[in-house]
Image (spheres, grey):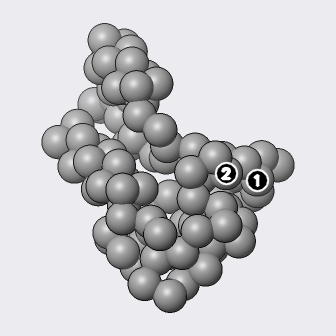
C-alpha cells in the first residue's frame, strides 16, 4: 500500500515556501473585500477564496484558531503549488 504522506523533504520544502508567503488571512484579508464581498472573518475569507480561485481551505476557527486557515497537502505536489500560487495572487487582488 502506498503511503499518502509526502516525503519529508517535500514537506520541508513546502514549509519553507509557505514561510516566505504572506498567507495570514487575519493580517492580510480581514476587513478587506473582493468584488463587493466583505471579508469579516476566517469563514468569509475561505468562502471568498473558494469563489475567487477555486481553492478550498478550512477556516481556522473550525480548529479553535480563527486567525488562520488550514491547507491540506494530501494532493499532488503540482496541484498544491498551483493552489498556493492562486492564494498568493488572490491576496494581491484584495481591495
Task: Give the labeled residue for mark 2.
Answer: 26
Relative to 37, say whether 76 is above or below.
above
Mark 1, secondary structure of its residue: loop
Q: Residue furthest bottom?
A: 36
Relative to 54, say whether 42 is above or below.
above
- What label sits on residue 66 in the rendered view? 1
Position of residue 95 measured from the top left corner of the image (x, y, whole percent): 47, 69
- The quadrant holding residue 74 is top left
Mark 2, secondary structure of its residue: helix
Relative to 87, say whether 16 is above or below.
above
Which of 91 and 86 lies nearest the eye of the viewer?
A: 91
Q: Does label 1 or label 2 sit earlier along the sequence?
A: 2
Q: Quadrant of the N terminus?
A: top left
Which of 19 and 15 lies nearest the eye of the viewer?
A: 19
- The quadrant holding residue 20 is top left
Residue at image position (50%, 58%) is 57
**Do tag 1 and tag 2 residues touch (Cβ < 8 Å)?**
yes
Residue at image position (61%, 80%) is 38
Q: Is residue 73 visible?
A: yes
Residue at image position (82%, 49%) is 64
Q: Residue furthest top?
A: 9
Residue at image position (35%, 49%) is 88
For the residues marked 1 and 2, what is the alpha-carbon distance in whole angstroms? 8 Å
Position of residue 75 measured from the top left corner of the image (x, y, whole percent): 30, 46
Amino acid at each position: 500500500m502506498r503511503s499518502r504522506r509526502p516525503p519529508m523533504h517535500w514537506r520541508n520544502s513546502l514549509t519553507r515556501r509557505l514561510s516566505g508567503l504572506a498567507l495570514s488571512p487575519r493580517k492580510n484579508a480581514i476587513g478587506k473585500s473582493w468584488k463587493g464581498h466583505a471579508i469579516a472573518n476566517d469563514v468569509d475569507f475561505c468562502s471568498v477564496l473558494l469563489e475567487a480561485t477555486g481553492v478550498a481551505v478550512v477556516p481556522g476557527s473550525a480548529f479553535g484558531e480563527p486567525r488562520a486557515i488550514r491547507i491540506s497537502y494530501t494532493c499532488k505536489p503540482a496541484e498544491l503549488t498551483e493552489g498556493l500560487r492562486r492564494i498568493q495572487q488572490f491576496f494581491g487582488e484584495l481591495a
